[in-house]
Amino acid sequence: MATNIRIGLGYDLHRTEVGRPLVLANITIPHERGLHGHSDADVVLHALIDALTGAAGLPDVGELFPNTDPRYKGINSAELIAATMRQFAETGGQIVNLDVVVIAEKPKLAPFKAAMRQRLAELLGITPDRVNLKAKTGEGVDACGRQEAIACHCVVLIEKPAA
Ligand code: MG
């Protein structure tokens, strides 16, 4: 039987802001700087949505959930993932695996990686062995390195029904 696999790539970056909560992969991480944004500014979930919709041929996160729409102000991005997964389910696709790279100079994310992986798996309805997550720094250079921003890259592999 022919496989019908597709890959999607997502990327997002948000500026840091003192006093905002830091939410990454739907986990709130104690830190003096959170991320600026219309929603909860969860860069991991936003990159994930773009990877998933990219693989599935669906509209991207900005088209699905415009940051000018007051409905999405301050929204928990888990709700955006749920809405994306409803659309994805209609395509008949299934997630094979995802790989995530978070770029944050601070805080150190190692203590939170297991919880972030687990939460991503829960949100997507897959087992954690299909989710990988790495944390990198910006080596003190560029916006991430200077703690002005946190970024995320994500790739998702999906299998669509045989064409
Ligand atoms: Mg975003």
Image: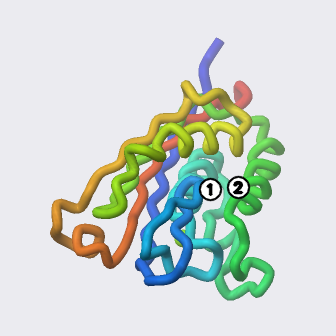
Q: Residue at x 60, y 48 (%)?
A: 52
Q: Which mark is residue 81?
A: 2
Q: With 114 as the anchor, is 15 left or right in this view?
A: left
Q: Amino acid at mark 2?
A: Ile
The verdict on label 1 being within 8 Å of ligand 1 is no
Residue 141: where, in percent of width, then height?
Answer: 16, 69
Q: With 23 as the anchor, is 92 left or right in this view?
A: right
Q: Amino acid at mark 1?
A: Asn
Q: Residue at x 58, y 60 (%)?
A: 28
For label 2, the SS is helix
From the viewer's perspective, is the residue at label 1 or at label 2 nearer?
Answer: 1
Marks 2 and 1: in contact by CB < 8 Å? yes
Q: Residues within 10 Å of mark 1 (few under 14, many from 20)?
A: many
Q: Which mark is residue 136?
A: none
Residue 138: where, in percent of width, then height?
Answer: 23, 62
Q: Quadrant of the N terminus?
A: top right
Tell me which label, 1 or 2, sits earlier in the chain: 1
Q: Which mark is residue 26?
A: 1
Q: Quadrant of residue 142?
A: bottom left
Q: Foreground residue, 29 or 140?
A: 29
Q: Residue at x 62, y 82 (%)?
A: 38
Q: Foreground residue, 49 or 159?
A: 49
Ligand 1 location (quadrant): bottom right
For label 1, the SS is loop
Q: Quadrant of residue 90?
A: top right
